[in-house]
Amino acid sequence: MQSYQIVDWGKPLQLRIRETPVPQGEEVLVRIEASGVCHSDVHIRAGYFDLGGGRQARLSDAGAPLPLTMGHEIAGTVVAMGPQASGVTLGTRGVVYPWIGCGHCGFCAQGRDVDCEAPRSLGTRRDGGYSDHVIVPKGRYIVPVGKVDIHLAATYACSSLTAFGALQKLPPLGGDDRVLLIGAGGLGLAACAIAPLVTEARLVVADIDPAKLGAATRQGAWATFDARDPGGALALKQAAGGPIRGVIDFVGSRDSAQLAMGVATKGTVIIIVGLHGGSLEVPLPLLPTRNLTIRGSYVGRLEDLQALIRFAEEGRLPPIPVTQRPLAEVDRILDELDERRLVGRVVVTP
Ligand SMILES: [Zn+2]
Ligand SMILES: [Zn+2]
């Protein structure tokens, strides 16, 4: 098995060759056909998230083991099953739900793996998809892709799932309302594709890159806004042409969160998704007087991934642009993501 692994935090990934693992107990072995490259892996490779004010959340303190194979948008074929494995059959082609919990806490019992305090997530706590094979703890975490293109399906495990999870946290909105999406990278484009299934509100997309704004328009954005506009939040409010009742911040930086606060009106729900890092100073009286909500959203549930694949199979989910590149380029692709040079999602293939 060939895997590109973090061996030292902050250093380039290294190719490591090991015996292909044999699934034990309830585990299944998936031969990987596609693995999406996610911006969060730029931060994981670095070994920390920026909390602002010079503070960092170090992954070594959070229990992430080294060496670690990242990659959490994994799709492929089940090629071996442990003696107690169930919930899937040999030869199934599927996308792997990677946000796996401990399996026995209260949250896991409710299907809320994502809130589990002892996660076994693939690509962040256990070896993931920058490899040619991956062990999945249980067969039920493989969602068959049916006739959906397997490279596109891989991206549903994080970028689309995260966008879907965030969109579901918006308040009920009508066609006169606006939802602002900040960031038109892989997540922002996925949100444009999924939003019509979740909300009637019109989408306004802000980014600093005109090429990404063009992609957002093609993906169905109602209006776009160049976030470098010196007019700032005021100009954005005018461009929106209606009250911005929801903001999903796919960047998660000080600047993007300040822009979100600047456009908020009565009852606006601001959902922070991106992990760029930094901190936000919030004038506290605005929270009660504007009835504001600021909250986070982290990926989504297994049932959400199943729903996304169903929507795609039914033709209700327009595809986002996906570029295929060889697995051996994964470290360079992470650099390109860090420099914000990529449009759409890149999927590596072993
Ligand atoms: Zn991701
Ligand atoms: Zn749990």
Image (spheres, rainbow, N blue to C red):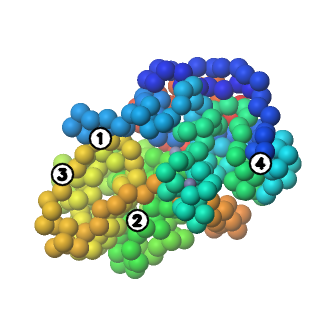
Q: Is residue 344 above or below residue 237?
A: above
Q: Amino acid at mark 2?
A: Leu
Q: Is residue 188 visible?
A: yes
Of 90 and 268, which appears nearest the observer? 90
- Taking 18 as reference, is 36 left or right? left
Q: Which residue is mark 1?
A: 51
Asked whether the residues under the numbered discs 1 and 2 touch, taking CB atoms below 8 Å apart as contact, a structural biologist would say no
Alpha carbon distance from label 4 to label 1: 38 Å
Q: Amino acid at mark 4?
A: Glu
Q: Quick one: label 2 or label 3, which is nearer the N terminus?
A: 2
Q: Is residue 3 above or below residue 268?
A: above
Q: Quick one: label 4 or label 1, which is nearer the N terminus?
A: 4
Q: Amino acid at mark 1?
A: Leu
**Residue 349, position as x, y percentages in the image:** 69, 34
Q: Which residue is mark 4?
A: 26
- Taking 261 as reference, is 321 left or right? right
- Taking 269 as reference, is 11 left or right? right
Q: Which residue is mark 2?
A: 203
Say what secondary structure mark 2 lies in.
Answer: strand
Q: Amino acid at mark 3?
A: Glu
Alpha carbon distance from label 2 to label 4: 43 Å
Asked whether the residues under the numbered discs 2 and 4 touch, taking CB atoms below 8 Å apart as contact, a structural biologist would say no
**Residue 1, position as x, y percentages in the image:** 74, 26
- Taking 136 as reference, is 191 left or right? left
